[in-house]
Image (cartoon, rainbow, N blue to C red):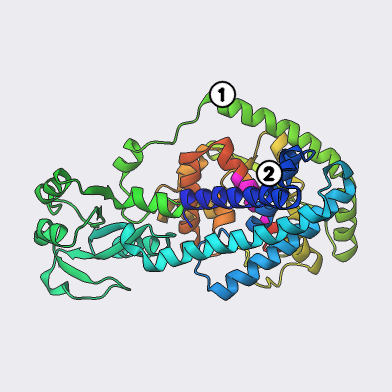
Amino acid sequence: MSGPSRRLEIVADAVVVAASFFAAALLRFGDEALGYRGIFSKGALCTAVVIAVLYYAELYERRARRRAELFLQLGQCMAAASVTLAVVFFLVPSLQVGRGVFAFFVVTAWLGLLGWRLALLWSSRAVSGLGDRVLILGTGVVAQKVAREMAKTSPVGYRVLGFLTEHATEVGRVLGGPSVVGALADLPTLAERLGITLIVVAQEDRRLRLPVEALLRCRMTGVAVVEATSLLEALSGRIPLRDLRPSWLIFSGGFSKPRLLARVKRSGEIVLALLGLVATAPLFAFVALAVRLTSAGPVLYRQTRVGLEGRPFDLLKFRTMRQDAESSSGPVWATADRDPRVTWVGRFLRKTRLDELPQLWNVLKGHMSFVGPRPERPHFVEKLRRVIPYYDERHGVRPGITGWAQVKFPYGSTLEDAEEKLEFDLYYVKHMSLLLDLAVLLETAKVVALGRGR
């Protein structure tokens, strides 16, 4: 689900859950419901817990769900929320909700969420005409990627009616769903006949081939025209490198680094790093003992990484591999699946991200941030900057313990993976903000809670 769609769905769920709580109070107390002690604070608590459970159960992830699956998932979420709230009520008696109100709330919230989400599901299938009617200029990799991302939007979003080509021989060819419906010269005629409301320019070579006059005619009739890179950025939370032009990076918004933001972020990180080091000191001792007892070698592992403005620094981690892991192979990417160099304790530390705890010291020293592009080793930086365009742009901000690429892309160990991760890193560099950092930290907590670490 795209960012705006996800936010709207979260807000809608919150409204439904809050309304369910007040409906439960009305069912229980009638006209005296507003006099129910702490009704607003208790309603806010119940709403927040249910939304958090839905978030961690990945009900806001972008994928199709059948009605039966939705029914079961929402039931499980309400059960988990009920247990969580029961624990909160036990720990803080002043927040307790009466049994009658609580029972009514659980049932009405479940039915309310199920009802509106089924309506959303129906609308996405039955009312597709409400979305933009889209024509894509181009048939290459970028054009097909645009079509795939548009197909994932929810609920009604976009309806891709076809592609336009520069080569008449391609007309009629099916490209993963929509087909090539005409040539570029047919643009004004097809746009009018098909009732197009949005044109996406996704030609991979536009020199002397962009149908400027035809696009202008369409634009003057009210049809929106967007460039593929900007649209893909909005839909996928990444900046696609394929066919990315320097002019787009220069003239597009973002990439600003206000001094006030930098100072606030740095001050907050110093405080949090100090608190984190103090709070996790007992855990440090336990992990250090586990590493020491299960494998030979030092507890902490120092590794040179490339940081802000390309400057090297020593990154600290709890050692998760054998001491001689790279003695014969030299620097190699770690693999996600059963890397034989990783110890059994190291595998657990990676899964739970506990191996990253010593990087609180890196944050305190200013080498790293909590959120930012993951720092890479100099050996790989030299290799990647030669083959991946704009690779060094990720060094314009401090690297992070976690990052947008880490929560959006699975663990990578190939050149292609590095290129895709850079697309997410560039998006972070462009849109860096405290709110985006908070979103990354919440996603990271979910990854750890669900056991999806490396």
**Residue at the far top in the pictured view:** 260
- Report whether 127 appears left or right of 380: left
Q: Between marks 2 and 1, how big is the CA–CA gap?
A: 28 Å
Identified by mark 2, the residue type is: Asp
Secondary structure under the numbered disc 1 in the rendered image: helix
What span is in magenta? 439-446
Q: Nearer the viewer, residue 182 or 295?
A: 182
Q: Position of residue 394 (x, y in %)?
A: 49, 44
Kindly identify which numbered label has been placed on residue 314: 2
Identity of the residue drawn at 39% across and 61% down: 149
- Report whether 162 appears left or right of 434: left
Placement of 291 over or under 215, stated as above or below: below
Q: Position of residue 134 (x, y in %)?
A: 26, 59
**Residue 124 sits in which quadrant?**
bottom left
Is residue 350 among what the camera can see? no
Q: Which residue is mark 1?
A: 260
Identified by mark 1, the residue type is: Leu
Label 2 vs 1, first from the N-terminus: 1
Q: Position of residue 146 (x, y in %)?
A: 34, 60
User: Looking at the figure, which quarter contains the C terminus?
Assistant: bottom right
Q: Main secondary structure of the magenta part?
A: helix
Q: Is residue 81 magenta?
A: no
Q: Nearer the viewer, residue 29 or 151?
A: 29
- Report whether 209 appears left or right of 198: left
